[in-house]
Amino acid sequence: PDSDTVDLLMNKKRFYDHAVANFWPVPRTWNIESAMELDAICDQVPFPAIIKPQVKNAKFRLSGMKKAYRVHSAAELRKTYVEIARWEREAVVQQWIPGEDRRVAFCLGYWKEGGDAAALFVGRKIRQFPVECGNTALCEPAPADWELRGGTLTTRIFSDLKYQGMGSIEFK
């Protein structure tokens, strides 16, 4: 894909704004860059919520921190942000979508020039590590109804973006 498309997909704030503008289903999201900005949104955040760095820079990846944290209160959110901000001050706070790991679907695929899907695989996580906020540790092909919905939505998103190359999207 071209560099602007990569930037859009990698930048959680840009992707969220684009998703909302295009009516793609995304959890409510707040982008913050300071403890003061976090304090300003805390009363809007439903708990539990999830917090993660906007971009996992090299320092963050080497820090040993998890890629995301589930938090249950404003106090826990603030405390977790202070830890994340040691490595990456820009963070994303999102509405927590309930459900166990096996409720996470993903669609992997390859899109040809112009955004047409050449191949798709829709899978379901069985386990992720760390539990609830991690990377896929064990998966299987998704049930047929998931395959249709996940494949259709991923194709719509990547086609809208004129995406080209290998890519994937997760859904819960």
Image (cartoon, rainbow, N blue to C red):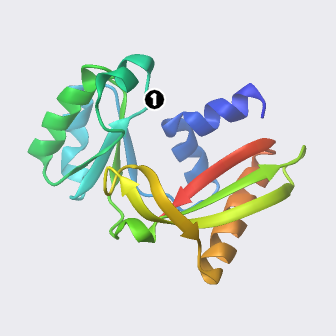
* Rendered view: 10 above or below 69: above
User: Residue at 65% of width from left, 66% of height from top?
Assistant: 122
- Residue 117: x %, y % from top left: 83, 57
Q: Nearer the viewer, residue 70 or 91?
A: 70
Percent from the top left, x then y, of residue 24? 60, 60
Looking at the image, residue 171 sits to the left or right of residue 135; the answer is right
Say if residue 23 shows up in the picture.
no
Residue 75 position by quadrant: top left
Q: Quadrant of residue 89?
A: top left
Q: Is residue 172 left or right of residue 162?
A: left
Pinpoint residue 79: horizontal percent, then vertical percent.
13, 35
Q: Is residue 129 left or right of residue 5?
A: left
Tell me the residue at 84%/50% (across/down).
Answer: 115
**Vertical position of residue 20 compared to residue 67: above or below:** below
Q: Which residue is mark 1?
A: 55
Local crowd size for mark 1, using a 10 Å CA cut-off: few (<14), some (14–19), many (≥20): some
Residue depicted at x 75% and y 46%: 161
Count of numbered labels shown in the rendering: 1
- Residue visible at 43% across and 58% down? 27
Left or right? Give the position of 71 relative to 29. Answer: left
Quick one: quadrant of the N terminus? top right
Element class at badge 1? loop
Q: Give how far across and how far down residue 82 sits, in percent.
A: 18, 27
* Amino acid type indicated by mark 1: Val
Among the 4 quarters of the image, the one containing residue 37: top left
Decide: is 111 above or below 152: above
